[in-house]
Image (tube, rainbow, N blue to C red):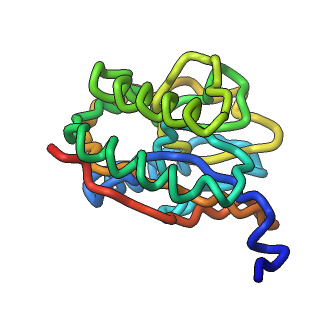
């Protein structure tokens, strides 16, 4: 017998979890940024919540979970591990934004992985976002925005070696992201 919780949609997204070397780089970047003049309400993203979003599925009926997992397994088998290059840390997606992010170059391999996730969305009846794919790791958020912060150049090559289905749980103090399925990429 289904309970109410079994019938409620789940808020999902597909992303890439940073590996240990990337986490160390992001930790060092955050430590440097903490020394700058940041908004008082700056809230740092915990290491366990860091990810690179490939596709935001939003509220999704639980009956689609099996199909999503099957399609993600296929994507993981067909997709090589790809290098990513973090090139800048700045207010995201533009000056005065409420997020601070480490942005990556959209390499052909990473863009192809993003496109496969968009096709997965369409296959389950979801409308993919229309905005341009700008891969990034969110580092901090601020309700008042990061208006006085200039971009900080970065140059770090990271290994993007997994595809992860996350459940976004809304909570006081910020969302928590629970990995439901994490698969290594074939390469």
The residue closer to the viewer here, 39 or 156, is: 156
Where 107 sits versus 141, above or below?
above
Residue furthest out toward the front: 1
The residue closer to the viewer here, 180 or 17, is: 180
Q: Position of residue 71 (x, y in %)?
A: 42, 46
Q: Residue at x 31, y 51 (%)?
A: 162
Q: Position of residue 167 (x, y in %)?
A: 61, 60
Residue furthest out toward the left: 187
Q: Residue at x 41, y 56 (%)?
A: 27
Q: Quadrant of the N terminus?
A: bottom right
Q: Position of residue 104 (x, y in %)?
A: 39, 29
Specify the quadrant of the image occupied by residue 4: bottom right
Describe residue 40's horizontal placement relative to residue 63 as left or right: right
Q: Residue at x 47, y 46 (%)?
A: 15
The residue closer to the viewer here, 109 or 87, is: 109
Q: Quadrant of the C terminus?
A: top left
Q: Residue at x 57, y 42 (%)?
A: 36
- Residue 138 appears anywhere in the view: yes
């Amino acid at each position: 017998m289904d309970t109410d919780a079994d019938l409620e949609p789940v808020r999902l997204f597909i992303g890439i979890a940073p590996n240990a070397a990337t986490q160390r780089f992001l930790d060092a970047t955050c430590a440097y940024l903490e020394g700058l003049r940041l908004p008082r309400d700056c809230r740092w993203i915990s290491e366990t919540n860091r990810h690179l979003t490939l596709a935001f599925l939003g509220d999704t009926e639980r009956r689609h979970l099996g199909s999503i997992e099957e399609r993600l397994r296929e994507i993981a088998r067909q997709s090589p591990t790809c290098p990513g290059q973090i090139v800048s840390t700045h207010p995201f997606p533009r000056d005065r934004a409420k997020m601070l992010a480490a942005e990556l170059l959209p390499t052909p391999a990473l863009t192809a992985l993003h496109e496969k996730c968009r096709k997965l969305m369409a296959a389950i009846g979801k409308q993919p976002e229309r905005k341009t794919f700008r891969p990034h790791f969110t580092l901090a958020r601020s309700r008042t925005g990061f208006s006085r912060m200039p971009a900080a150049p970065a140059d770090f090559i990271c290994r993007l070696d997994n595809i992860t289905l996350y459940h976004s749980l809304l909570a006081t103090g910020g969302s928590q992201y629970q990995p439901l399925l994490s698969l290594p990429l074939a390469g």
